[in-house]
Image: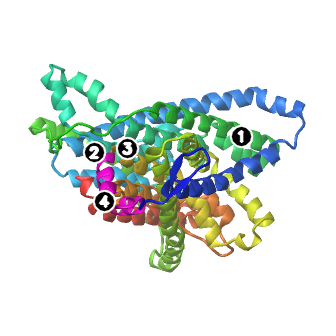
Amino acid sequence: MSTLTQILPMGRRIPAARLIFSAIGLAIGALMLLPLIWLALRAFEADFATVQSLILRPRTRMLLWNTALLVASVLALSTAIALPLAWLVSRTDLRGRRLVNLLAVIPLATPGYVMAYALLGLSGRSGFMAQVFDYTLPRIDGLLGATLALSLYTFPYIYLNLRAGFSGFDQSLEEAARALGATPREVFTRVTLPHLMPALMAGWLVVGLYVIGDFGAVALMRYEAFSYAIYIQYSAAFDRVYAAWLALILIAIALSVVWWESRLREGAHYARTGSGTGIGRRRLTLGPLGQALGWGFVGVVVLASIGLPVAVLSFWMVRLDDLPAVLPALIRAFSQSLSVAVPAALMAAAMALPVAVLAVRYPSKLSTFINRLAFVGYAVPALAFALAFVFFSLNAARFLYQTQLLLVTVYALSFLALALGPIRSALYQARPSVEEAARALGHGPFSVFARVTLPTIRPGVIAGMVLVFVIAMKELPIAFLLAPTGFRPLSITMFSRTSEGMLMEAAPYAAAIMGFSALFVGVVLRHDKKGG
């Protein structure tokens, strides 16, 4: 046989590709378990009575309820934004779809804490609205403020997954349903939406895990959630035991969400299996009123997600006395951010590929376990995740301590879930029969993957890399703890100046994070054939 196999004692044959992907996946999973080990060691320093009092205290229940309410609110609002946008771009003849596609992804370049600060900057007597329009808005904070800030930042995660789902969906299924007498609403709820569920659940999972672990937006909005409480315990109260137990509870919540998402996907099939080639992509024709309503919705979303932070940052920047003098330091900070964000995106995609292939093409208990481990890094609060690798490097690999290699690796592990969602969704919709035909023509498993599977899922791979890149460009807690001495990327520089009350001086660095990340997103999406 041309395909390498290994013969087990029981007579079962396991393809070499599966063995290699499994070994890589297990190695990634082992790295993911380091934070759990560290947190467990910290947590079990206390005796049983202390642990019981920490877990059962009323404050812990309050944090649990607040976090669940915030996650549900953000998922609802971000889906309400992303689903119409993805439908307009993928299924209608809306004019300027490529522009809409770009504008729908650019908010990923805006950090959540900048979005929260922009919302806060609108209100009050010294706020943007009061100074520019002589209209004082009431303060936006609490659950409402945190929901708005996080939804306006995270909805592109759901949009990218839904757009990929719409692009790969076989519209002949909708045609058949309509021919059988189904109404448009029934077609959407009984045919279209079920086939979009893999993409929708991948987006929900990523957004939900991000909201669970977010610190910046909830802190600025004064909303007490688990992540904020953990940060306070680490940085202010110095109660590492209680912080470790809060983090373990948070991880348990996140992993339970991952488990349920995986259970819902098991046994589901979404690829076309019948004969024929389906129909080409058909777009709904929008009349003048439809065009106006579509662009009206797009305008509101763009004004809130892009116009708001741009306007507030511009308000700060025009007050700088000498902007050209800031440029050398700004360029240096940007180049340092770029030096870790690009390799982190590439490494995350390389890690996500074998995990996704195992989950979709070689389903088993082992692949399911590895797939769930891939989300651990995203579920663990960034501060705890970074501290875990500080502990690891100091005790087991001192040569890695305070190196860019360690920072890039932790970025890739922490954001692996972002790359995995789009790649896995693309694999679900890639027809296995094409791969089987290539194998029948004599191609080995790795040749089929490189020449057939990888080109087919290219949009998903690109989307995954974009997600990792833009979040790595603005990530703060991991960089703050793991950055080498003298390494000051955009996020650290902005954080340092903002914490010192130098809001005007921090504005150029925030604008650079938004501008350069948005430019990169635009360049990538311009070459994405499924983008319009």
Which SS class for mark 3?
A: helix
Name, please, the residue furthest toward the top. 181
Which corner quadrant holds the N terminus?
Answer: bottom left
Distance between the Cα atoms at labels 3 and 2? Answer: 10 Å
Distance between the Cα atoms at labels 1 and 4? Answer: 38 Å
Residue pointed to by mark 4 = 525
Between residue 401 and residue 450, name the one nearer to us: 450
Between residue 243 and residue 530, name the one nearer to us: 530
Residue pointed to by mark 1 = 248
Name the quadrant containing residue 258.
top right
Residue in view at x 9 percent, y 37 percent? 287
Residue pointed to by mark 2 = 168
Magenta region includes residue 392: no
CA neighbours of label 3 inside 10 A, class few (<14), some (14 to 19), many (20+): many
In front: label 2 or label 1: 2
Distance between the Cα atoms at labels 2 and 4? Answer: 17 Å
Is tag 3's residue or tag 2's residue first in the polypeptide sequence?
2
Side of 366 where 513 appears, left or right: left
In front: label 3 or label 2: 3
The segment highlighted magenta reads 430-452
